[in-house]
Image (cartoon, coloured by chain):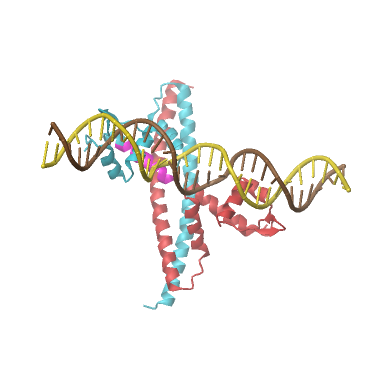
Chain colours: A cyan, B red, C yellow, D brown
Amino acid sequence: MKDTLYTATELADVLGVSARTLRFYETKKLIDPRRVGNRRIYNYKDSARMKLILRGKRIGFSLDEIKQFLDLYDADPTQVEQLKLLQDGVNQRISQLNQQKKDISQTLSELKAIQLATSEALKQKTPN
Amino acid sequence: MKDTLYTATELADVLGVSARTLRFYETKKLIDPRRVGNRRIYNYKDSARMKLILRGKRIGFSLDEIKQFLDLYDADPTQVEQLKLLQDGVNQRISQLNQQKKDISQTLSELKAIQLATSEALKQKTPN
DNA sequence: ATATATATTGACGTTAACGTAAGGATATAG
DNA sequence: CTATATCCTTACGTTAACGTCAATATATAT
């Protein structure tokens, strides 16, 4: 549900990371959960933000880059200057990601060629 | 040309990395250039291999992963066991890359939404 | 042949992204 | 209420991927 709350270890388990990782990201200002006493409580928004972070990592971004990235989402676009900076950031990310898409496609086609070759070779070897 | 030779710094410049990086990759057994005396000489094949490595990095792989990756290309598939291992490696990489493609597509569409929003906002602000 | 530039080999330094262990604070079970 | 489990903070450890520097060795220019 939208109103589920998690403790640190609960959210960590759900996301497949360690609680240490959550705390580390907090020191890096990537997330900022509520506190009840000194215990951390993560809400739906925190969880969604974490998923964005992890997606960024899978794409190969550093935590610093991911922070800039999140700032793109969070930016309060009230001033023209800020808006232009935001646009620049977005455009940079977009061209970077397009490059990565190319890299991945190329690598994928090469791997599929190997895949085909190996399955052919196996047919020869084990004429099952 | 196919028969161009490079010194370390030349190839480094062409590839946009440092000579230190080339030496580092050599200690990691990712490349193995010829020597003339003790000077390194890189040929076309070395250069192509380096480009594969850098593509791997852009995709977000670690050097260790890239090494496994290169071994997939280099593998001499003479034994059935080796072939099966090769297939497993290739299949893992493929699913990993497909996941990354999804991540990138999703991120791209989100960024394009921001892009649209900012350009709209700018139109309002600067009704040029 | 000598001076200057360039390449090589250690070796130590650095940054990112956590892991791990120690010592308290605080829930929670019985 | 006490014992045990859970969470907190602090701090030091670790690995990857190089950067940087010092001491040599080797080219290259003059």
Q: Quadrant of residue D2?
A: top left
Given residues A42 and C3, the one toward you in this image is C3
Report x, y in % for residue A126. 40, 77
- Magenta span contains residue A127: no
Image quarter hosting the N terminus of chain B: bottom right
Name the chief secondary structure element in magenta: helix
Count how many numbered circles sit on residues in the image: 0
User: In this image, A29 relative to C30: left or right?
Assistant: right
Residue A57 among those drawn in magenta: yes
Task: Tell me: B55 left or right of A49.
Answer: right
Residue occupying the point 46% across, 24% down:
A82
* Residue at x 28% of width, y 38% of height: A8
Closer to us: B10 or D24: D24
* Residue B12 placement (x, y as % from top left): 63, 48
Image location (x, y in percent) of residue B77: 49, 70
Residue at 44%, 65% (x, y): give it. Answer: B86
Q: Is residue B9 visible?
A: yes
Q: Position of residue B51 (x, y in %)?
A: 57, 53
Q: Is residue B104 visible?
A: no
Name the residue rendered at 50%, 57% in the picture: B67
Which stretch did the figure color magenta?
A47-59
Towards the viewer: A58 or D2: D2
Left or right? Give the position of C8 relative to C17: right
